[in-house]
Image: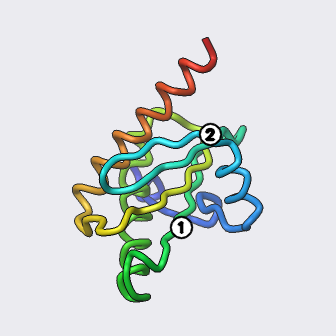
Amino acid sequence: MTLSDFCFSKKFKLKSPDDFRKVFAFRLKVSNSHFALYAMPNNLSFNRLGVAVGKANGNAVVRNRLKRLLREAFRLTRKQQKAQGLDLVVVPKKGCVLEILVLKDSFLNLTFQVIKFLNDKKQ
């Protein structure tokens, strides 16, 4: 593994409101006790991530920390994610745990659920 395998450059980010709308409109949602993960195929060779944190999660300091932790969980698990070519939007639930190890495991489990759902849908 090289250092570039762990980078989180702009190409991995969902930024425009239109991108978020498309992912939410696709209506593929999996969730656990920590967050909900919305997904949509993007016809690229890599996954992209968007994070939507509402005010129910706390003040600006808490919300920004949560965004950083979720992006870090995505970045660290990017090579372990079996699915490539997905747009992912993460929406944390109220009272979400702020521990990176828990978020990494949750992120991997939910991406596996997305893969399973998409494979079942194709058949």
Q: Which quarter of the picture shows residue 103?
A: bottom left
Label 1 crowding class (10 Å Cα cut-off): few <14, some 14-19, many 20+?
few
Q: How many marks?
A: 2
Placement of 42 over or under 16, stated as above or below? above
Label 2 crowding class (10 Å Cα cut-off): few <14, some 14-19, many 20+?
some
- 29 or 50, nearer to the observer: 29
Q: Nearer the viewer, mark 1 or mark 2?
A: 1
Circle 1 SS class: loop
Q: Residue at image x 42%, y 33%?
A: 113
Identified by mark 1, the residue type is: Ala
Q: Residue at image x 37%, y 73%?
A: 66
Placement of 48 over or under 100, stated as above or below? above
Q: Residue at image x 41%, y 79%?
A: 63
Placement of 31 over or under 58, stated as above or below? above
C-alpha span from label 1 to label 2: 20 Å
Q: Residue at image x 51%, y 34%?
A: 83
- 88 or 6, nearer to the observer: 88
* Residue 46: x %, y % from top left: 59, 44
**Quadrant of the rendering where the C terminus is positioned:** top right
Circle on res. 85: 2
Identified by mark 2, the residue type is: Gly
Q: Is residue 6 left or right of residue 21?
A: left
* Residue 91: x %, y % from top left: 48, 60
Circle 2 SS class: loop
> Which numbered disc, 1 or 2, marks the residue that appears first in the sequence?
1
- 17 or 86, nearer to the observer: 17
Circle on res. 109: none
In this view, the residue farthest toward the right is: 18
Query: Which residue is identified by label 1?
Result: 52
Q: Is residue 116 left or right of residue 87?
A: left
